[in-house]
Image (cartoon, rainbow, N blue to C red):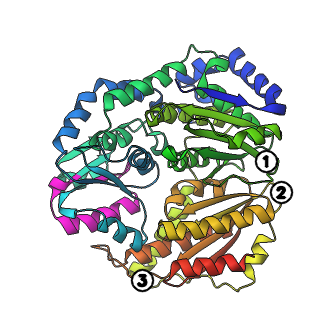
Amino acid sequence: MDPQTLSLGAYQDSFVRGLRVWREENRVRRLWEKDPSLWTGKDEARWLGWLDVVGRERSRVEELETLAREVSGFESAVVLGMGGSSLCPDVLGRSFGQRSGFPRLHVLDSTVPAQIEALEANINIGKTLFIVASKSGATAEPNAFEKYFFDRVRSGAQFLAITDPGSSLERLAREKGYRRILHGEPEIGGRFSALSRFGMAPAAISGIEPRTFLKRAQGMVDACGPDVAPEENPGVSLGVALGTLARAGRDKLTLFTSPEVESFGGWLEQLVAESTGKDGKGIVPVDREAPGAPYGDDRLFAYVGLGPSGALSNLEREGHPVIRIELDSVDGLAEEFFRWEMATAVAGSVLELDPFDQPDVEAAKIATRALMARFEEIGELPELPAKGDGELKALLSTLEPGDYFAMNAFVAMNRENDLELQALRHRVRDDKRVATTLGYGPRYLHSTGQLHKGGPNRGVFLHITSEDAKDLPIPGQRYTFGQMKSFQAVGDFEVLRARRRRVLHVHLGPDVPSGLRALRLLAS
C-alpha cells in the first residue's frame, strides 16, 4: 500500500488526543455501522453507500468488462457531466492516457462556448460515445450538453446514461433509445461516487482494467476497516489530522502533486470543499498553487504523487505541518479515492458538521434558474456589474492574514488562459501572503462554490467573464451556451454579494488572454 506520513510538528499532541477519542469511543466501528451521531445526527446514514461500494462493483465486474468490449470500436468517449459525476473520469483520463484499442476519454463540464468548440475539434463526432452522467438527471449543464450533441448525432446508439434509478435522465434515455443505461446508487452522493459506476464505467470504457483497479481499491478499504485502530487506519488518521488542524487554524490544505497525477487535485478540491465548507466552518483546498515563500500559519501541506517531493522538506523544517503520500504508480489512485473519501468523512465529524449535504450549492442554482426563467419569459439578459479600474486594487486591499483569494473564471480552460490566471493568482499570493485558489466556471459552482458561500467569511472573490467570439445554441432552448454561462456567473455573484462576501465582477472582451494580461497589470 502507498505509504502515508503525517509530520504535524506542534500539532502532534492535539492529533494524538483526537485519535484517542476515536479509539475510546469506538468511532471507527460506529462509522462503518453508519451511526449518524458521529456527525449531526440527521440523515447522514443514508449517504454512506460509498463505504462498501467497492465490494459491490467487484461482484459485478464482468458487466464492466462486457461494456468495455462492446464500445471498443469508438475512437473517443466523452463524459457529459458536472461536479462529482465528471471529476473522477477527468482524473482517470488525464492520468492514464489513451489505452491501445480503447477510446480516448474526454470530459465536458463547461458551458463556455469556446470549451465546447475545442472538444469538438478533438473528436470525430461520428465515432464518439457520449456518456451522460447525472445522478438526479436534473442537473442543468449535462442536460444542455445532451441536447447539443444528440442534435448533432441523432443516434441513441452513440449515447450511454449513468444515473440513479427512476431519474428523468433514465426516462429520456429510454425514449431516445440509448445503447445502455447504468444505474448509480441513491445512497452515494456525487462527490463520493468515484469508485461507483460514475467512475468505474468510464474507467473500463477507456481501457483501465476494472478487476485490477478495484482489487487495489479494496486493499485501502480493508486498511480503513472497522477493526483497524485509528492510529493504524490511513483514512481515519488522515481525517483526524485534517479536522484537528483546521480547528487549530491550519485550514488551508495546500496540495502538491507530481505531474503524472496533477489532475487528482481537482477531484480532491471538490471533495474537501463541498463536504466541509458549511455552517461557517471549512477546509479550503488549495490546488495547483506553485511552491513559494513565505507562507502564513494557516497552511497544512499535503503531497500526493509518484516519488518523493523535495518541496516539503524545507516547509517541514520551518515548522509547517506536512502530509506525504507517495504512489508507486498511477494505479495507486485507486487507493487514494477511498483514502480521501474516508478522511473527508472523518474530518467532517471532527468539525461537527454534515459532510454529505451541500445546502449552499442550491442557492446559486436557484438564482441561475430565476435568471433563465426571466429570459425565457421576456428575453431579458442579466446586467453584468460595472467595474472601475481602481476596484481590483481596492478589493485586494481588503485581504488580511488568514483570508484566501479565489478567482472564479468563466473562460475556456486552455493553456494560454491558464498561464495568465496562474500568474495573477501567484502575484496576489506573493504580494498579500495569502492562500489563493483558481476555479473555472461553472465547474467550481459544484465544488468550491459551497465553501465560498457556506464556509468561513474569509474569502475575497474575483469573478471573471468574457464576450464570446462565437456562441453556440442549445437545441430546444431560447438561450445559448454563452447566455447560460452569463446566467450562472451573475447568479453566483448575486448570492455571494447577498452573503456579504467581498466580491468583484470583471467582464472581458472576446480576446480573453489580452484581457487577462491587462487585469494582471491592474493588480500590480
Part of the protein shown in magenta? 130-159
Q: Sequence-wise, which precedes: disc 1 or disc 2?
A: 1
Please tell me which residue is depicted at 40% across the width and 62% down the height of the picture. 140
Q: Position of residue 310 (x, y in %)?
A: 67, 40
Identity of the residue drawn at 75% across and 83% down:
390
Looking at the rendered structure, the kind of residue marked 1 is: Asp
Which one is earlier in the sequence, the residue at label 1 or at label 3? 1
Q: Work out how far the residue at label 1 is from the one at label 3, CA to CA, in angstroms.
A: 41 Å
Please state if 250 lies on the left or on the right of 517 as rendered. right
Q: In the picture, residue 520 is in which quadrant?
A: bottom right
Secondary structure found at label 2: loop
CB of mark 1 within 8 Å of CB of mark 2? yes
- Residue receiving disc 3: 469
Count of numbered circles in the view: 3
Relative side of 50 to 147, left or right: right
Q: Residues within 10 Å of mark 3 (few under 14, many from 20)?
A: few
Relative to residue 74, is residue 21 drawn left or right?
Answer: right
Quadrant for residue 197, please give it.
Answer: top left
**Dot 2 corresponds to which residue?**
401
- Residue drawn at 36 percent across, 68 percent down: 118
The label on residue 362 is: none
Foreground residue among 71 and 23:
71
- Report the quarter where the C terminus lies: bottom right
Nearer the observer, 24 or 157: 157
Check disc 3 and give the amino acid type.
Answer: Ala
User: Which residue carries the number 1 mark?
Assistant: 298
The reply to whether callout 1 and callout 3 are in contact (CB within 8 Å) is no
For the residues labelled 1 and 2, the Cα–Cα distance comes to: 8 Å
Local SS, label 3: loop
Quarter of the rendering containing residue 383: bottom right
The amino acid on which the numbered mark 2 sits, given as a three-letter code, is: Pro
Q: First in sequence: mark 2 or mark 3? A: 2
